[in-house]
Image (cartoon, rainbow, N blue to C red):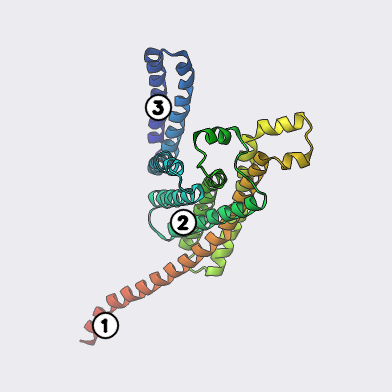
Amino acid sequence: MWRRKGIALVCLVIVLLAIKVLAATFVTDRLLQDKVALLYLVVIFLGSLIIVGGSKGVKTIVTLTITVLLILKVLLPLILAGYNPALVAILICEIITVMALLFVSGFNHKTLAAIIGTSGGIGIAGLLAFAIGSMAHLTGLGNDEAIHLILYSRQLDFKGLLFAGIIIGAMGAVMDVGISISSSIHEIKTNNPGMTMGSLMSAGMNVGRDIMGTMSNTLILAYAGSSLNLLLLFTTYEIPFNEIIGRDNLAAEIVRALAGSVGLIATIPLTALIAALLAEKSSRRTCVACRTITRWINNPFKQKQNR
């Protein structure tokens, strides 16, 4: 195993050197030459997935490619065509979730529980963002990009775009939590077949509590990082808190971060419950099947003894 990983690492270095040579030979534009470094980063990312993940890393690359294509070729054209951005985002997120989890983990109880838990978490995040956004009268016009889009089309639903961004932003973290809890319960049940549904759910909740703190921080820090320049501007000019919170762009970021975090938290008990229920049912079916096979095997011996 380590030998193959070493060979893959050498291949990665060779690819990076080849890109450097080809860029120096064929790329004459100075601006493009500077941006070749981005290609290095892409290759390092893909190579890391393959070296560490192996076959699952390759599957991850395939699902990532399909995800990008769905966003570029389906989500964006449908929004520009006038469809409701939030509904389109929910549909695309559900497709991505099902496709990614099935392709990487296969069709089993573990994947089914993760799909249900992730879908529930995304739905809760979207509904909460919509409800709070409506109460706060968020318009979705709090950044320069939205203002420029008005010049392109006044038919776009900017409020729906805001909620679509919240749903898409929360999907990755929610899906990660869902498959982590479901996989944990699956492994626990496999190694301890006698565990009851209540014990399995309790174990899943314990795993989820450990994940919850780091993932919630991940979402909030990601949104804080994207708004770092804006936060520095507010701090530099000592703008009062009531004026800051009244700005549409910052209020939208707060809703985005907290609604996504609530969706993530809701995913934990939902996935734990579904995964424990499916694991218990699977165990019962396995026991019934084992008893049936045992009877079928033993019957011929009993018949021979009777003869």
Q: How many marks?
A: 3
Callout 3–callout 1 Cβ contact below 8 Å: no
Q: Measuring from the top left, give residue 233's x and y in whole percent.
A: 72, 30
Q: CA distance from mark 3 to mark 1?
A: 62 Å
Real-space CA distance between mark 2 and mark 3, rounded to the nearest whole angstrom: 37 Å
* Location of mark 2 (residue): 115
Point out residue 188 in the picture as x, y percentages from the top left corner: 50, 60
Q: Earlier in the sequence, mark 1 or mark 2?
A: 2
Percent position (x, y) of residue 224?
65, 38
Check the image and name the residue furthest to the left. 307
- The residue under label 1 is 302
Image point (62%, 40%), residue name: 223
Q: Amino acid at mark 1?
A: Lys
Determine whether 150 is above or below 299 in the image: above
* Earlier-in-chain disc, 3 versus 1: 3
Give the residue type at disc 2: Ile
Q: Residue at x 76, y 28 (%)?
A: 236
Secondary structure of the residue carrying tag 1 is: helix
Q: Which residue is mark 3?
A: 10
Q: Secondary structure at mark 2?
A: helix
